[in-house]
Amino acid sequence: MDTQKYTETVKKYSSMVYRIAFHDCRNRADAEDIMQNVFLRLYRSKDAPQEEEHIRHWLVQVTIRESKRLFSRPFKKREDLLWEIRPSKSSIAKWPEVLKEERENDVLEKVLELPRKYRTVIYLYYYEEYSVKEIGALLGKRESTIQTQLQRARKKLEISIKEAGNYEGAV
């Protein structure tokens, strides 16, 4: 990939890669590290797609893999487990500027409180508008697994929103 095309790709897709990484790891510094690794891999890769329609798909796949790799480290597993048990309002309140418009949205807060496997599918389905089939291909899972995860995530979100007293039938 030539330098000009690489620069255009980074400008066009950096916010998408960052949002996917942030939704997965819920940490600004980790999301920035993942984003940097993804674009470094793109720059170094000889087999990265050259067609515009395939670049986005490739970037999403690599971002998800980089997030998984980050969470495969023992210290990250413990940190993620602590978040799953009791997410703090102060850590949720420290969202980056990319998500400033969504900060007021209670649903996004509830999505970030979901377990990782549900956060990822919800984000890809609703925010990036991938189909169930495409998400299955990206994550290397069957379509039925993705549908089940979406269904369970929706149910968890509905319960969480009802408990918060913000239920309006929107989930």
Image (cartoon, rainbow, N blue to C red):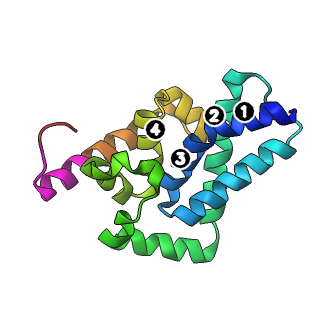
Q: Out of 168 and 147, give the one closest to the viewer.
A: 168
Mark 3 residue element:
helix
Whole-number angstrom distance, CA of label 4 to CA of label 3: 17 Å
| Circle 2/circle 1 CB separation < 8 Å | yes
Query: Dot 1 surroundings within 10 Å: few (below 14), some, or many (20 or more)?
Result: few
Callout 1, which amino acid?
Answer: Glu
Secondary structure beneath dot 1 equals helix
Q: Residue at x 29, y 54 (%)?
A: 110
Q: CA distance from mark 4 to mark 1?
A: 32 Å
Question: Is the residue 85 above or below the residue 26 in the image?
Answer: below
Mark 1 or 3, nearer chain start: 1
Q: Quadrant of the N terminus?
A: top right
Which residue carries the number 2 mark?
A: 12
Q: Are marks 2 and 4 in contact (CB under 8 Å)?
A: no
Q: Which mark is residue 146?
A: 4
Q: Which residue is mark 1?
A: 8
Per the image, label 4 sits on a secondary structure element best described as: helix
Numbered mark located on residue 20 in the image: 3
Q: Residues within 10 Å of mark 3 (few under 14, many from 20)?
A: many
Q: Which portion, as a residue range, is magenta?
A: 157-167
78 in relation to 155, above or below: below
Quote the CA–CA distance across marks 2 and 4: 27 Å
Q: Is residue 136 visible?
A: yes
- Where residue 131 sits: x, y (%)? 48, 26
**Sequence-wise, which precedes: disc 4 or disc 3?**
3
3D distance between C-alphas at marks 1 and 3: 19 Å
Q: Is residue 42 left or right of residue 70?
A: right
